[in-house]
């Protein structure tokens, strides 16, 4: 059986175009009108919220944590912005002792250095070969495990007293950067946005999996507690671009608010692209998507009365007939 889908446009606002389609057989225009009437208040809110969210991300590089909290990519669950007086002393101490790979349990510091002795402590010798191209050179470094109490009188004692598994530096910091800021960040187990499968312990483990320090420039320091994850928002020139699933989250939030039952389709567009919106509204006979690509398969499976496409006007097809059998 062939099903032809005829596109009927409904435009709300200036930037977003909401496109409906009806099945050309067995469905009256009254059915389409009822779906439009039921969805119009929701879609009006959607356009307003979506535009405000997109503008905020584009201009400020930040996003509401209410949205982040419902995103599977969120990995930053806590941010403590610090202003330790000993930050410069700590960086100088790291440099003078040629320390790398430093971590803290809150009781002990662990690090590696090419220096054979540190503060009267002899390190454990580690030898390895370095170099991928050309002759490989044998290098020797030393591993250390030092009690935090041993350094309690140092001006940076506040920094090393907090547990951290990494000490990371943002790409905008250079040796000549004068203004540096420090944040202590809690990271969740769900950091692996490229992992296709969960670990079994993710079913019951919640909250922070580990902590790390972030040494940041002024702009990144201002945004660190309003981004949710590091992978989805990036700066391009003087504005920001993103891969956050804002459409899906805003739309499904509004469906819940308006009491409209929906079934979310499963999609694996989660690694390099955004997480796609793909929802069935069975009580209204509506299939909603943020893309016209691959829609034929969904229509064949769901056989909806109405298709709702949330896209920019210029991205919608004109006069397109879609056929499903």
Image (tube, rainbow, N blue to C red):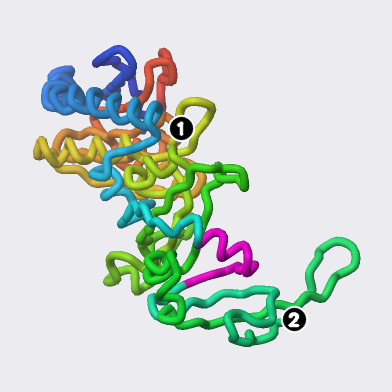
- Establish if 216 lies above or below 137: above
Question: Between residues 275 and 25, which one lies in front from this camera angle?
Answer: 275
Residue at x 44%, y 36% (from the top left corner): 242
- Establish if 246 lies above or below 50: below
Specify whether residue 72 is in view. no
Residue at x 24%, y 16% (from the top left corner): 12
Q: Does residue 187 appear to the left or right of 284 in the view shown?
A: right
Question: Between residues 53 and 125, which one lies in front from this camera angle?
Answer: 125
Measured from the top left, where is residue 20 in percent x and y? 28, 22
* Label 1 element class: strand
Q: Earlier in the sequence, mark 2 or mark 1?
A: 2
Q: Does residue 179 appear to the left or right of 254 in the view shown?
A: right
Question: Between residues 259 and 286, which one lies in front from this camera angle?
Answer: 259
Q: CA distance from mark 2 to mark 1?
A: 44 Å
Look at the numbered discs 2 and 1 and tell me whether their residues touch, using CB distance below 8 Å: no
Measured from the top left, where is residue 202 in percent x and y? 34, 69
Residue at x 68%, y 76% (from the top left corner): 115
* Label 2 element class: strand
Q: Alpha-carbon neighbours of circle 2 within 10 Å: few (<14), some, or many (≥20)?
A: few
- The numbered mark at residue 241 is 1
Measured from the top left, where is residue 29 in percent x and y? 17, 17
Location of mark 2 (residue): 127
- Magenta span: 90-103
Asked if residue 102 lies in the magenta stretch, the reply is yes
- The numbered mark at residue 219 is none
Q: How many marks?
A: 2
Quarter of the image with the N terminus is: top left
Which image quadrant for residue 304? top left
Residue at x 42%, y 73% (from the top left corner): 153
Measured from the top left, where is residue 226 in percent x and y? 33, 43
């Amino acid at each position: 059986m062939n099903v032809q889908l005829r596109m009927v446009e409904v435009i709300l606002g200036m930037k977003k175009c909401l496109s409906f389609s009806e099945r050309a057989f067995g469905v009256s225009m009254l059915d389409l009108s009822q779906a439009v009437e039921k969805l119009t208040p929701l879609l009006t809110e959607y356009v307003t919220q979506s535009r405000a969210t997109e503008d905020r991300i584009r201009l400020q590089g930040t996003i509401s944590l209410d949205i982040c909290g419902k995103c599977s990519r969120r990995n930053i669950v806590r941010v403590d912005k610090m202003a330790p007086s000993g930050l410069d002393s700590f960086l100088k101490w790291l440099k003078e002792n040629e320390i790398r790979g430093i971590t803290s349990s809150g009781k002990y510091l662990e690090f590696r250095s090419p220096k054979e002795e540190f503060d009267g402590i002899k390190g454990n010798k580690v030898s390895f070969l370095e170099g991928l191209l050309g002759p490989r050179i044998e290098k020797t470094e030393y591993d250390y495990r030092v009690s935090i109490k041993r350094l309690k009188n140092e001006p940076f004692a506040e920094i090393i007293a907090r547990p951290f598994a990494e000490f990371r530096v943002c790409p905008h910091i250079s040796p000549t950067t004068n203004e540096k800021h420090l944040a202590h960040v809690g990271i969740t187990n769900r950091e692996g946005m490229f992992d296709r499968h969960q670990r079994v312990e993710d079913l019951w483990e919640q909250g922070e999996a580990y902590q790390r320090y972030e040494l940041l420039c002024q702009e990144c320091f201002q945004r660190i507690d309003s981004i949710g994850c590091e992978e989805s928002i990036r700066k391009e020139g003087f504005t920001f671009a993103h891969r956050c699933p804002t459409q899906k989250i805003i739309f499904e939030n509004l469906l819940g608010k308006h009491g409209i039952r929906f079934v979310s389709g499963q999609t694996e567009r989660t690694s390099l692209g955004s997480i796609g919106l793909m929802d069935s509204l069975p009580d209204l006979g509506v299939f909603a998507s943020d893309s016209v690509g691959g829609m034929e398969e969904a229509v064949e499976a769901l056989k909806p009365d109405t298709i709702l496409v949330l896209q920019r006007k210029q991205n919608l097809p004109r006069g397109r007939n879609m056929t499903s059998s």
